[in-house]
Image (cartoon, helix red, strand yellow):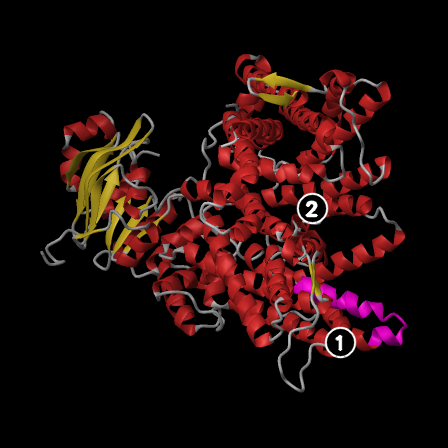
Amino acid sequence: MIELRNPANILTAIVIGLCAVVPFLAPALGEPFYVIVFARIMIWAIAAVSLNLIMGYGGMISFGHAVYLGIGGYTIGILAFHGVNNAWIQWPLGIGICALISLIFGAISLRTRGVYFIMITLALAQMIFFLSVSAERYGSDDGLNILGRSDFGLPFYNLSDKLTMYYTIFAFLLLSVFVSWRLIHSRFGVVMRAAKSNDTRVQAVGVSTYRYRLTAFVIAGVMCGIAGMLQANLENFVSPDMMNWPRSGELIFMVVLGGMSTLFGPVTGAFVFLMLSEILSTWTIHWHIIFGPFLVLVVIFARGGIAGLLTPRAARE
Amino acid sequence: MDYVLLTEQFLNGFQLGIILFLMAAGLTLVFGIMDLVNLAHGSMFMIGAFVGGTIAVLTGSFIVGVVLMIPAMLVIGMVVEMTTLRTLYPRDHLDHVLATFGLILFFNEATRIIWGPEGLLVPLPAFLDGTVALGAITYPVYRIVIIVIGLAVALGLYLLVSHTRIGMLIRAGASNRTMAGALGVNIPLLFSIVFGIGAVLAGLAGLIITPITQAQIGMGEDVLILAFVVIVIGGIGSIRGAFIASIVTGVIDTMGRSFLDVFLLLFLPENAAESAGPALSSMLIYVLMAAILFFRPQGLFPPKGAGG
Amino acid sequence: MSSAAANPALEARTLRKSFGGLTATDNLSLEVAAGEIHAVIGPNGAGKTTFVNLLSGLMKPDAGDILLEGRDITRLSAPARVKQGLVRSFQITSIFRDFTVLENVMLSVQAGQGHSFRFWAPAAKDESLRGPARELLEKVGLGDRIDVVAGNLAHGEQRQLEIAISLATHPRLLLLDEPMAGMGPEESQGMIEFLKALKGEYTMLLIEHDMDAVFALADRITVLVYGKAIATGTPDEIRGDAAVRAAYLGDDSSEGAA
């Protein structure tokens, strides 16, 4: 099922392999900074995997998906601000809030299609963004420092330890890809993919596609929220910029760059996008002037993304 | 009840609505006629501000800046359309969003390289500075000028679309592109012109707001999102819808910010009202949009063709 | 309440639908008896597809009721009507082009098995989906094409797939919207034989232009002109009806319309 000779999959394997060994490799090569770079890439990859679920497989182009990074992150931040560091309170609450908000936003947005949907998801995300900017108590524009990481109260598992933090993120990345894989191939996933292909026909065989879309939207929102909670823990910091609309645009880009509606596309997409940003930004402070046209060219010439370029023949997942 | 403040804020809201309308009109025209989702419209807003502002500063005359900005934006808009956007017409909306997002990055950075990160100060011409008495209130002359310009543009657009040959061609092209093309209308040129008009409108909006807010990198994006909210509320492709939705949005947003905490004081204790006020008022317009779309997902004036 | 046996399989009562100034469905009443094949014919623009859309739930009527085996389904959504047993096929082929033929029908089988909120087990290997899908595809004549990507099928094969998808949900009543659309004479003959074989198993409301098919299959025919039913009867009765001749079959010729 997973073709081992497909160059796109080989690239993914390399990326994941690198992620696995970087905490040891990077310091050994004298570049310990790359550990945190890779940790950040993995968090973005989780967010991209969640977006691909609804965008790649479900056809729902959400231009406000980064908002869930913020919601997850700020839940941790605000609780920590009030002295609640207990992971067993922070995490379920974060997941619950993400589920609730994605349910509400999804219920509103999914009444529309096409460009209306894109704009509404954007506007709803902006709403939360402005809410966080105006929240003086929690740092507004400047963001909120988080003094301690989520405390699980377990002697053998402490997120304050750098390696534990890193490999927790890594584990969640693998988990999110795995969950994505099971979902896509399950009966639920079949309905999602069919609805993307021909919604009228799915309804004509008796399936109310709205419910399935909404469910997928919530799942994706929660998955992205978890990425946000991981980010809050990693950086010990949250700010409104986690969820500004360029972030949502970048997420969409990562998914498209890697290859939309492929299982590993979002992972390679996040990796290439962020590594490219890192490298370009060391050449010149004005790297956006190269990056912008690069994005345009990808859209015009390489719409299938990296997976499309590398896969010898259109292979279906 | 402070009627002076109320009237002032209403006028401010109306003026914001005018700026939004100038943005939304171009956006809705381009989307309604060419079916193109153009995020780089915000960049046109910014470029109009910087280019027009620079001309104004160099020539010492704001009026000259405005006048010369118009052909400049027309050319810039048409060039962008012909080089980059043309390839996107047959593609789906996601491709439009992605490509124009890339353009935003490019334009913001180009502006930063040319003008530096600090932005551009565009001074208000002396004869437009000052206030005028309107009944009981004194109101800045310049803001009234903005309103007048906006209403003139609205009227002009209406006349253009419904009473001129070009307007007829625009409406034909929107209604049935292939047929219009088969009848000999030069569709590619028409689209370039429409895009150019949109760029001029956006640039005008950007330039006339600079004496109040200054020209800044990325100034277009926040207005752009509001403009999209406006055209979604108003109905994509409808200029009339864009006008009504813009004014309503501008007024509600401005008055909401000024008076929401007062309103909240009716139910909430002072502390809560003071902190909730600013937070809620920034969300107000999006709540409005969500409410309208919940009941009318196609907007107030759903699309059936170009024009108002 | 009357028993299901006494009720017609499908009843449309004074359905009305207008689009702006155009009345597409004009006080249309029609009954389909259990087990019969009831054909609806009429010239282009008669409102046949609007009628099917009203019955299947894609459009809401301005007035009138629809009853399925005596149960009022007028307020039900399209998916809900399918769950009640009213299934349609589309005149313009509506399949899942990126899925294989087998996957197309498996989806439909899946839809007929209850909800799809199952997130874990892979659907592709599920024999409870593959088995019935394969069986149905054999029946329809696509047994040797099950692994072909649907978009690559020939037109006639796509029409067969279209029917198979509709059948997979165990309908009680089939609304067939021009099943033979775009088919050549041989393929049409095959489809006619197939539908004949289904007779008795399913009640059918058949919209068709192809007169050979209509007269070969229909137990009764209703003629639709400008959204109104101008005549209902057996094929012989319709052939002899003067109003029908004038409005539809043309003065002397009795060829099928294109």
Query: Which quadrant is home to the N terminus of chain C?
Result: bottom left
Which residue is nearer to you in this view: C113 or B54? B54
Instruction: Tell me residue B181's x, y (percent).
Output: 58, 23
- Residue at the spot 58% in from the left edge and 33% down from the top edge: B31
- Residue numbers of the magenta segment: A25-46
Residue A163 appearing in the image: yes
> Is residue C126 left or right of B141 when viewed as pictured?
left
Q: Which of the 4 image quadrants contains residue A209?
A: bottom left
The numbered mark at residue A49 is none
Q: Give the amino acid at mark 2.
A: Val
Q: Earlier in the sequence, mark 1 or mark 2?
A: 1
The kind of secondary structure the magenta stretch mainly shows is helix
Task: Kindly indicate the quadrant of the structure image that contains residue B73.
Answer: top right
- Distance of label 1 from label 2 (alpha carbons): 38 Å
The reply to whether the magenta stretch includes residue C161 is no
Return the mark for residue A299.
2
Q: Looking at the image, which is closer to me, B174 or A41?
A: A41
The answer, for residue C100, to whether it is visible in the render is no
Disc 2 chain ID: A
B56 on left or right of A225: right
Q: Which of B171/A221 is in front?
A: A221
**Residue A162 — which label?**
1
- Residue drawn at x 65%, y 56% is A255
Among the 4 quarters of the image, the one containing residue A25: bottom right
Crowding around mark 1 (Cα neighbors within 10 Å: few <14, some 14 to 19, many 20+) is some
Location of residue A278 in the rendering, given as x and y in whole percent from the top left corner: 81, 57
Seen at 30% across and 34% down, the residue is C47
Residue found at the far bottom of this picture: A155
The secondary element bearing badge 1 is classed as helix
| Whole-percent x, y for residue A20 in the image | 74, 75
Few, some or many residues within 10 Å of mark 2 (<14, 14–19, 20+)? many
For badge 1, the amino acid type reads Lys
